[in-house]
């Protein structure tokens, strides 16, 4: 089986700035990878490249067996991206936002409803407009979309941001469940750089510490891909 | 494909129903345009009744600019454009869905404006079939051209000002053809209006096809 992600000397330009400058990365299917690095290092660009949202200026990039140089759009259906933005419509309710996303992805609406409940957005919150939600509730709504779509590859950019302790523990649980279900998870987070926390007697970190790669200056360290 | 078109159109119309931008801002703006024309064109001399068709379609065209801008403004908030790119929806379906939603809003607005020209301009709206078909074809044409240039301008920093600059010259054939068709219908000689209607249908078909074919590339480039 092809790896989930294989980048070789991948260069992504934002304007004329090389946000990724020759990145190498190999992620096997079913792996959980934690991408760390300072602000502006290229973590978000790396995730967006893997989601097929950035064009490749040079190098090679293959995600879920799709060559991003020629078919970047084809990978999107099987990829879920939780970015800094939640892709939510302020005038639609939580339920309407999730249902629109799952219908667009061809997923049964019931899965969306189940995801809403799992993310703690059931009850009255379902019918609240996204524009009236707190930052944490918006994050949970975006996570509900991701969970409901059940992508093969989860790309999460600071998934713990804006969430309370319970929410952060929930994210860790979602990552663990996704991996247990055979999905590949790549997430960028500063959360694991901190000391471990315990919430209600439960370790808030994922059960298994994921493989960690570091992005610095647009290059990936420990990407485990031998250059030819 | 049709399912996705309906999904996008339904989403956009639901957003408009909730936000009430069309009802509280675009419709009053269109009526204000009609009133201003009435102030400017000496109502006592019957000028308004004779120019009613042209003024009606100018008001519709100005309103179409606002409706298209609004349609793409909702996609620029919270990175909605990226959300659409990742949604798994066919770009052609996104285009047709957004155009259908704008066309539906324009049709509703035209009903209101038709009442407006009847009351304010003392215009007699005869030839109902030609009037109605002209509204449908012109609305589809305005919406299709609007959404094509809307996505093009949405990716620019100066989208609020560049859209009218791009779109007004493009939709001038719609304003002209729809005006001629309405004038013929209102004058009691609809046979003179059918060729203009055919032109409107051709315009709508061309822009719907070009938009559906090119929307994916334009969505990526923004």
Image (cartoon, rainbow, N blue to C red):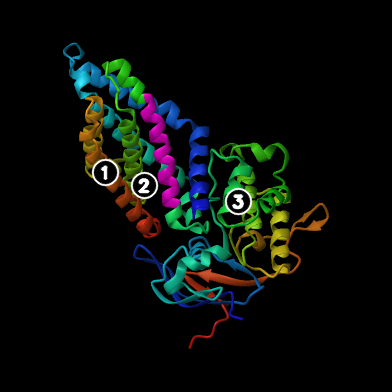
Q: Which mark is residue B147?
A: 2
Q: Give above or below for B76 relative to A83.
A: above
Marks 3/2 same chain: no
Q: Nearer the viewer, mark 3 or mark 2?
A: 2
Q: Which residues are magenta?
A: B94-112
Expressed as whole percent of the image width and height from the top left, the position of residue A3 reads 59, 78
Residue A223 in the magenta stretch? The answer is: no
Q: Secondary structure at mark 1?
A: helix
Residue that label 1 marks: B198
Q: Secondary structure at mark 3?
A: helix
* Callout 1: chain: B
Q: Nearer the viewer, mark 1 or mark 3?
A: 1
Between marks 1 and 2, how big is the CA–CA gap?
22 Å
Marks 1/2 same chain: yes
Q: Is residue A172 visible?
A: yes
Number of numbered labels in the structure image = 3
Q: Nearer the viewer, mark 1 or mark 2?
A: 1
* Callout 2: chain: B
Query: How crowded is the residue under tag 1: few (<14 C-alpha within 10 Å), some, or many (20+)?
Result: some
Q: Name the quadrant containing residue B34.
A: top left
As drawn, which residue projects farthest toward the right?
A201
| Of residues A45 and B182, the one drawn nearer to the viewer in this rendering | B182
What residue appears at the point 55 percent right and 46 percent down from the top-left corner?
A: A88
Please indicate whether residue B82 sits to the left or right of residue A15 in the image.
right
Residue B99 in the magenta stretch? The answer is: yes
Query: How crowded is the residue under tag 2: few (<14 C-alpha within 10 Å), some, or many (20+)?
Result: many
* Callout 3: chain: A
Residue that label 3 marks: A142
Expressed as whole percent of the image width and height from the top left, the position of residue B123 reads 27, 19
Q: Is residue B218 visible?
A: no
């Amino acid at each position: 089986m092809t790896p989930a992600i294989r980048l070789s000397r991948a260069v992504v330009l934002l304007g004329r700035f090389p946000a990724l400058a020759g990145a190498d990365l190999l992620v096997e299917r079913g792996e959980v990878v934690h991408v760390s690095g300072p602000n502006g290092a290229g973590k978000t660009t790396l995730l967006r490249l893997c989601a097929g949202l950035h064009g490749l200026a040079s190098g090679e990039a293959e995600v879920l067996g799709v060559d991003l140089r020629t078919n970047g759009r084809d990978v999107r259906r099987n990829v879920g991206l939780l970015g800094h933005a939640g892709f939510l419509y302020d005038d639609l309710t939580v339920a309407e936002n999730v249902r629109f996303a799952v219908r667009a992805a061809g997923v049964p609406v019931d899965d969306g409803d189940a995801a809403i409940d799992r993310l703690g957005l059931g009850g009255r919150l379902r019918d609240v407009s996204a524009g009236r939600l707190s930052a944490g509730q918006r994050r949970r709504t975006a996570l509900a979309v991701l969970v409901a779509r059940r992508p093969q590859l989860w790309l999460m950019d600071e998934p713990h941001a804006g969430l309370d302790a319970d929410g952060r523990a929930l994210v860790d649980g979602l990552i663990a469940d996704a991996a247990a279900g055979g999905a590949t998870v790549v997430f960028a987070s500063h959360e694991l750089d901190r000391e471990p926390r315990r919430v209600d007697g439960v370790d808030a970190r994922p059960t298994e510490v994921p493989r960690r790669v570091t992005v610095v200056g647009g290059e990936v360290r420990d990407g485990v891909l031998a250059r030819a | 494909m049709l399912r996705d078109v309906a999904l996008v159109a339904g989403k956009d119309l639901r957003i408009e129903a909730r936000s009430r931008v069309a009802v509280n801002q675009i419709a009053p703006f269109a009526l204000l345009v009609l009133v201003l024309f009435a102030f400017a064109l000496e109502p006592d001399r019957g000028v308004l009744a004779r120019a009613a068709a042209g003024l009606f379609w100018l008001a519709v065209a100005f309103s179409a600019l606002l409706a298209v801008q609004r349609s793409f403004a909702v996609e620029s908030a919270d990175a909605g454009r990226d959300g659409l790119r990742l949604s798994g929806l066919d770009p052609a379906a996104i285009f047709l869905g957004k155009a259908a939603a704008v066309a539906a809003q324009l049709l509703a607005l035209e009903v209101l404006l038709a009442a407006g020209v009847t009351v304010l301009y003392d215009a007699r709206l005869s030839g109902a079939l030609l009037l109605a078909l002209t509204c449908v074809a012109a609305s589809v044409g305005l919406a299709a051209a609007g959404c094509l240039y809307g996505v093009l301008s949405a990716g620019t920093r100066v989208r609020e000002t560049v859209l009218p600059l791009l779109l007004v010259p493009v939709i001038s054939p719609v304003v002209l053809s729809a005006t001629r068709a309405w004038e013929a219908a209102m004058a009691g000689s609809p046979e003179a209006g059918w060729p203009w209607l055919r032109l409107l249908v051709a315009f709508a078909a061309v822009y719907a096809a070009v938009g559906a074919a090119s929307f994916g590339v334009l969505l990526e480039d923004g």
